[in-house]
Amino acid sequence: MKSLRSKAIILAWAISVLMIAQTAAAGNRKDGGGGGQGSGVTVTINGVLLINQRNGATLAEISGGGFQSGGTPSVSLDDGTRLTVREVSRTMIVASIPKNTADGEYRLTVSTGELSQQNASFGISLGGEMIVDCIDWFRSGPEDEHVHTEVHVVDENGNAVIGAIVTWTAENDVVGVYQTNVSATRDNDGHADGAGCVDPSGSGVTDWFCCIGAGKWDGEIPGKRACDEGRYRAVILDVTAPPATNMVWADEWPRDNFIDLFPKPQ
């Protein structure tokens, strides 16, 4: 009798342990394990890339996670505009912003359900133009033998644009194009010594690039390399919009930018 009772207790204990293990496994799947499905998956947005379309609409490529946790997600702006979802994966949504959406600042929201972790928002900006306000040339070195260039970018209202990517060539009348530069615009004063930029925005400026090693003076400075003599100028090839914006480059830049580089009189 005692033996039968002991076996029943052991069996009940085993069933209890098995049920606990199954419950824990189900809970893990709900929280995103085993493929990231289930209502408990947290939705996150890491970034939004805005791409202007020929039909006037704007394509939004939304990167993040948890996008397939509750069927097709809902994507909207905080003014009530609903975006048309084109493609969905666990980590990417491609959606279309209607072409009649007004320019301005918005919060874009992705929603897969009613719970707080099933919603995520990200700031975006629609509209605006980018203009290369000025291209600054400046010299350095004990003999002014090095010449540098940097680019300042503003919007149509004269405000600095941070995070735009500028591509430009630097050339001189000795060798032609000697350098192609690519740089993001940053929030700092830059150099802006007046040789090309007069009272620039003070920010929205690229890194600066030096032509050191491009050539040397007649009667080379002992132990130093120097740039070619002559006139230097830059040609802006492209300006791409900062992240989470669809600004366009107005193709405006000072075509007559230049600096003359000659050795100091001995």
Image (cartoon, rainbow, N blue to C red):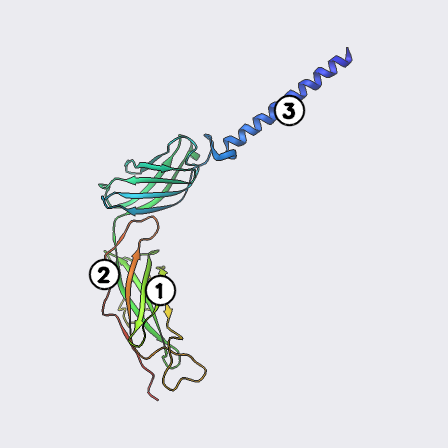
Question: Which residue matches tag 1?
Answer: 181
Q: Nearer the viewer, residue 10 or 122?
A: 10
In three-dimensional space, the C-alpha distance between marks 1 and 3, rounded to whole angstroms, equals: 65 Å
Q: Which mark is residue 252?
A: 2
Observer-nearest residue: 202 or 175?
175
On the image, numbered disc 3 is attached to which residue? 17
Residue count near mark 3 (Cα–Cα under 10 Å), binned few <14, some 14–19, many ≥20 = few
Q: Is residue 54 left or right of residue 214?
A: left
| Relative to 217, residue 176 above or below | above
Precedes in sequence: disc 2 or disc 1: 1
Instruction: Return the disc, 1 or 3, that comes first in the chain's sequence.
Output: 3
Q: Position of residue 256 (x, y in %)?
A: 23, 70
Outermost residue to the right: 2
**Left of 159 or right of it: where is 23?**
right
**Residue 235 visible in the displayed image:** yes
Write the residue at 25% across / 51% down: 128
Name the kind of residue labelled 3 in the image.
Answer: Val
Would you identify the image quadrant in which residue 111 lies?
Answer: top left
